[in-house]
Image: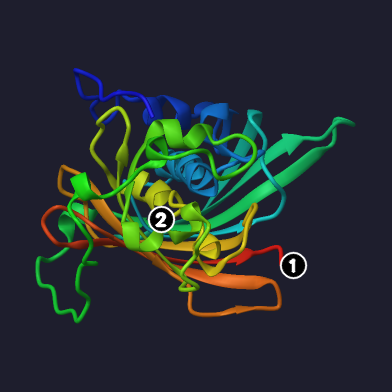
Amino acid sequence: MPEAASTRAVIGDSEFDRDTAVTRRAPGVYDIDLSAGWTIISAVNGGYLLAVLGRALADTLPHPDPFTVSAHYLTASQPGPAVIRTDTVRTGRTLSTGQASLFQYDEEGNEVERIRVLASYGDLTTLPDDVRTTATPPAFPPMEHCFGPEDGPATVEGSSAITERLMLKLDPATLGWALGAPSGRGEMRSWFGLADGRDADPLSLLLAVDALPPTAFEIGLKGWVPTVELTVHVRHRPAPGPLRVSVTTRNLAGGFLEEDAEVWDTEGRLVAQSRQLARVRLG
């Protein structure tokens, strides 16, 4: 992971912003060049893709912030040119709903749909301040007692370019897999940020829920864990500073598992939640 920049990047002017920027070609049609900097093994990270589609929907819909985003990953996306097509499904005073699909071309020049999203957007700044919850922030060591990808040898074959763009400091209690002794518990916890120091915003929360190593590693499995479906709920605009991310899996069956993620900010607020269904390679 690169050393921290002497000048922190700001929201709107960071590598994440540049790499998720879309160009409007026509109403509801956007072009983007998917960056190779957000790949893991051989595919583009699903959270990065969700942020790309989220940015296109933010331009399409009258409300600024993603409230709930549900994505089905149809085929693996590759770095390079892509086209996004969006449609407005409904607009209201509080929420607007839209859908978006990302397309690339195969070797024969045929258009292939990679991911399809249905999302509702609103304005997080208008939400009331009352909170009634039984949820509690995850408890794990301070950042200086946690470990990142730079602290050990590569443990996943293939590209891990995304780790160079993230600040990840994982709870040692969830790092048995990296030492060849997975705990058998489907848990992963980490401090999270962007490597250039850019603070989190609602769009980058779509990345945060899918940025940690898969819980399958701590269960004792290896290799790519492709996402089938991912739903994210953005609950609050995050405060500045590193986030705490906790991901758990309770059930692996038939070659599929679920991952439930929570993202907490520096003020102890639950700012995002997600659930995804993913495939795993058994044996």
Q: Amino acid at mark 1?
A: Gly
Residue 151 higher or lower than 226, as above or below: above
Outermost residue toward the top? Answer: 6
Q: State the residue in front, 252 or 152.
A: 152
Answer few, some or many: residues within 10 Å of disc 2's Cα (few below 14, many 20 plus, some between 14 and 19).
many
Q: Are marks 2 and 1 in contact (CB under 8 Å)?
A: no
The residue labelled by disc 1 is: 283
- Residue 141, given in percent of the width and then of the height, sits at 20, 57
Residue positioned 65% across, 53% down in the render: 223
Q: Is residue 111 left or right of residue 235?
A: right
As displayed, is residue 138 above or below residue 51?
Answer: below
Residue 273 seen in the figure:
no
**Which quarter of the picture shows residue 91?**
bottom left
Q: Nearer the viewer, residue 253 or 13?
A: 253
Instruction: Name which quarter of the figure residue 260 lies in.
Output: bottom left
Q: Residues within 10 Å of mark 1 (few under 14, many from 20)?
A: few
Residue depicted at x 45% and y 45%: 54
For the point 67% across and 35% down, the residue is: 78
Question: Does the image show residue 67?
Answer: yes
Quadrant for the C terminus, please.
bottom right
Point out residue 176 in the picture as x, y percentages from the top left corner: 44, 60
Q: Is residue 147 left or right of residue 134?
A: right
| Residue reaching furthest to the front | 180
- Per the image, the residue denoted by label 2 is 209
Say which amino acid is labelled 2.
Answer: Val
Task: Mark 2 or mark 1: name the one nearer the start of the chain.
Answer: 2
Q: Secondary structure at mark 2?
A: loop
Quadrant where the N terminus sits is top left
Distance between the Cα atoms at labels 2 and 1?
A: 27 Å
Q: Which mark is residue 81?
A: none
138 on left or right of 60: left
Q: Position of residue 116 (x, y in %)?
A: 62, 53
